[in-house]
Image (spheres, rainbow, N blue to C red):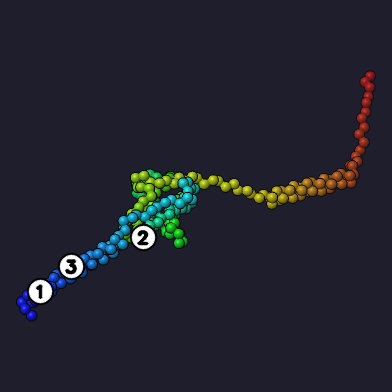
Amino acid sequence: MNTATRRFFCLLISICLIVAPLTGRVALAQTLSQETSEELDVLAPLIEPVAEQASAGIAGEAQSFRAVITDNNAIASVILFHRFAGDPEYSSTEMLRVGAQDTFKATVITTVGDRRDIEYYVEAVDIAGNRAVLGFPFDPLRLTLAEPVPVAVTVDDSGNRQRILWGVAGLVLLALVIGAVGSDDSTDATPETGDPLVIEITESQ
């Protein structure tokens, strides 16, 4: 093999050694870019209030809060933040999925006599960390409370009335018996006899 041929093969081998790593790196970069684009999630969950969500409730009853939450990937957590009007801080309650639906639910306990509005908002976070809220801490949603309606209680006093009637009938019967006995005693009694009363009348001279 002459010198020119040797130089040609050396140049060809050098080119292959240079090009091969570059080709591998490009292929690897394309693969990583494709995987990254497939896993990248920048869409936040979508929160919608359910149609049957009440805007008012009764003080002393457990108040139910629902929301429909969907996401292009998966939901990591749903939290209900709530407070009674006038309270400085919000309390948090986890909202749980209702069955296999996209509906999430949480309840808040109330007390009789406390008619303050419940201020609340909902926060949902997906597994990629994207966050969405329904309502805001500075502008919350509201649920008003009303006093429970008094329930009329009907008392069955038929037993008392019956006892009273029997008592009155007994008194009337007793009075009749006493009257009958008294009349018999007066009929059988013998009048007392005594000396006749003599009145003398004299004329004056």
Question: Taking 23 as reference, is 158 above or below it?
Answer: above
Question: Image quadrant of residue 205?
Answer: top right
Q: Position of residue 58 (x, y in %)?
A: 49, 48
The residue to which callout 1 is attached is 8
| Front-lying residue, 185 or 72 | 72
Q: Position of residue 105 (x, y in %)?
A: 44, 56
Q: At x 39% / y 49%, what residue is drawn?
A: 120
Q: At x 47% / y 48%, what residue is drawn?
A: 54
Query: Do the CB atoms of the residues marked 3 and 2 lie less than 8 Å apart?
Result: no
Q: Position of residue 183 (x, y in %)?
A: 85, 44
| Front-lying residue, 43 or 1 | 1
Question: Taking 188 as reference, is 69 above or below it?
Answer: below
- Image quadrant where one finds the N terminus: bottom left
Query: Mark number for residue 22?
Result: 3
Specify the amino acid type for callout 2.
Asn
Mark nearer the N terminus (2 vs 1): 1
Specify the amino acid type for callout 3.
Leu
Q: Secondary structure at mark 3?
A: helix
| Front-lying residue, 173 or 29 | 29
Position of 94 with respect to 8 (left or right) is right
Question: Image quadrant of residue 127?
Answer: bottom left
| Front-lying residue, 33 or 204 | 33
Specify the amino acid type for callout 1.
Phe
Question: Image quadrant of residue 10?
Answer: bottom left
Q: Position of residue 48 (x, y in %)?
A: 42, 51
Mark in the foreground, 3 or 1: 1
Query: How far separated are the C-alphas under marks 2 and 1?
Result: 56 Å
The residue to which callout 2 is attached is 73
Position of 30 with respect to 15 (left or right) is right
Mark nearer the N terminus (3 vs 2): 3
Query: How far separated are the C-alphas under marks 3 and 2?
Result: 35 Å
Q: At x 70% / y 48%, what residue is drawn?
A: 161
